[in-house]
Image (spheres, rainbow, N blue to C red):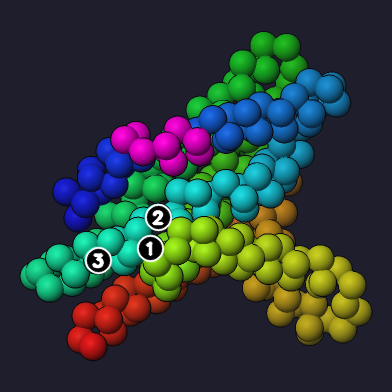
Amino acid sequence: MKAIFKRELYAYFTTPIGYAYLVFYFVLSGCVFAYTTLFAMSADVSAYFSLMQLVLTVLLPLLTMKLLSEERRQKTEQVWLTAPVPVTHVVLGKFLAAYVLFGTSLVLSSLSFLILTRYAEVKIAVLFGNLLAMLLLGGVFLAVGLFVSALTENQLAAAVGTVGILLGFLALSFVSQLVNVYWLRFILDGLSVYTRFRNFTQGVFDVMAMVYYLSLSGLFLFLTVRVYDRRRYL
């Protein structure tokens, strides 16, 4: 797993994808920071992280779209499918490589708020709560992207499919606001990854939401492993 992790992380910087992600991420996160804090004259970190959810919905599929689809297109997946290497190690290695790049960029962009503390009162507890929630949410997005990448050999299809699923999660939060039936709204809110983010924006450490995010990430990683387990024995 360690070798796969190193190879995939290195590959981000030997191909345009890693650089494209970093450029788009820091440009967009800078614009969001300027809009929600500097232009709004506000030190509320919640507005920044709420908008960054939408940014990550579009950007994170860039990190996962080639991880498995490219190997399927080039037939290089047959090497590790026929080797005595656990599929779980391969999937986790690729996932962790994407997660490290995402997590590093997120933490670096969040340092802007620590600089802002010199000029305004920033609620540090709320900042770290939002940061933790974004790290958990990003894990879900990457796991979904990896799963979709395992289903196709076309990188563009993998990216579009991932964005579609993530927008479906977003749609659940909007639909739940229009539903008047309590039990149905409760179910929709429970399934929406965005709705569960709200408590963190208010500085509340939601343990159930944390368990939900980790479980959902684990579910999609498990499904990815099952795709390759099935393909290995066909």
Residue 139 in the image: x percent, y percent? 48, 55
Can residue 179 be seen at all in this image of the molecule?
yes
Question: Is the residue under label 1 in contact with that under label 3 (CB below 8 Å)?
Answer: no
Q: Which residue is mark 3?
A: 75
Residue 119, above or below 104: above
* Residue at the far left in the pictured view: 84
Is residue 175 toward the left or the right of residue 124 in the image? right
Q: Secondary structure at mark 1?
A: helix
Q: Which residue is mark 1?
A: 69
Q: Main secondary structure of the magenta part?
A: helix
Is residue 166 toward the left or the right of residue 80 in the image? right
Label 2, label 1: how far apart the Cα atoms are: 5 Å
**Mark 2 or mark 3, whichever is nearer to me:** 3
Is residue 47 toward the left or the right of residue 206 in the image? right
Magenta residues (range): 13-21
- Three-letter amino acid code at disc 3? Lys
Q: Which residue is mark 2?
A: 66
